[in-house]
Image (cartoon, rainbow, N blue to C red):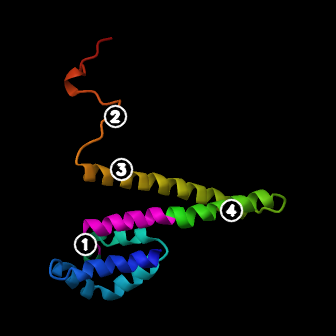
Amino acid sequence: MNIIITFLVFFYETSKSNERSEFNEWFKKHLTLIAIITVFSIGDVKLFRLFDSNFGGFDICSIKFSQLVLDLIIYGGFGNILLKDLPQLIIQILYATKFTTSYKIIAFFALIINIIVLVVSIVEYGYYINDIIKKRCGKRVKSDNDVPRDTVDTVVEI
């Protein structure tokens, strides 16, 4: 799945050559480094966010992707959770429950780390998807804890 998203991202961005000549110039200038990062992003599509992160002020990290590509990266990462990380965790749990007598401490630590990574990834993508929904709706979702500013007393006497 990651390799498909990887090629879709660059195919989409380079195919809009008339609109995004800046992207095409950036792509040609950094072709070797882009190829290396693309190979590594086959493992996790979130690595593409390095290109638009402005990390260290480097030119290779300064391009702006279109909103469609950013959404594709986010949904691809969420798909990774469902198709790669979750099944891996299930296999580790099944292994731990079936082979409890010979279960090694290293395998136990790998299980704990995978649980932590999965929980962090789910929370991270929850924030991303929440942000996308807010942008699409164009309004803020009101919660039960929201209180109008004019009804809050700023002075508290004890």
Q: Which residue is mark 2?
A: 143
Quarter holding residue 9:
bottom left
When the figure is inspected, residue 91 is found, relative to residue 132, above or below; the finding is: below
Q: Nearer the viewer, mark 2 or mark 1?
A: 2
As measured in the structure, the alpha-carbon distance from the residue carrying label 4 to the one carrying label 3 is: 30 Å
Q: Is residue 25 visible?
A: yes
Q: Is residue 146 magenta?
A: no
The residue shown at (72%, 60%) is: 94
Q: The disc labelled 4 sits on which kind of residue?
A: Gln
- Residue 132 location, x and y as percent? 31, 55
| Magenta span: chief secondary structure | helix
Q: The disc labelled 2 sits on which kind of residue?
A: Ser
For the view shown, which residue lies furthest in the front direction? 137
Front residue (pair 17, 158): 17
In the drawing, what numbered circle is on residue 128?
Answer: none
When the figure is inspected, residue 132 is found, relative to residue 50, above or below; the finding is: above
Marked residue nearer the N-terminal end (2 or 3) = 3
Quarter holding residue 153:
top left
Q: Which residue is mark 4?
A: 92
In the drawing, what numbered circle is on residue 62?
Answer: 1
Marked residue nearer the N-terminal end (2 or 4) = 4
Q: Quadrant of the C terminus?
A: top left
- The magenta region covers 61-80
- Residue 11 location, x and y as percent? 31, 81
In the drawing, what numbered circle is on residue 130?
Answer: 3
Front residue (pair 91, 33): 91
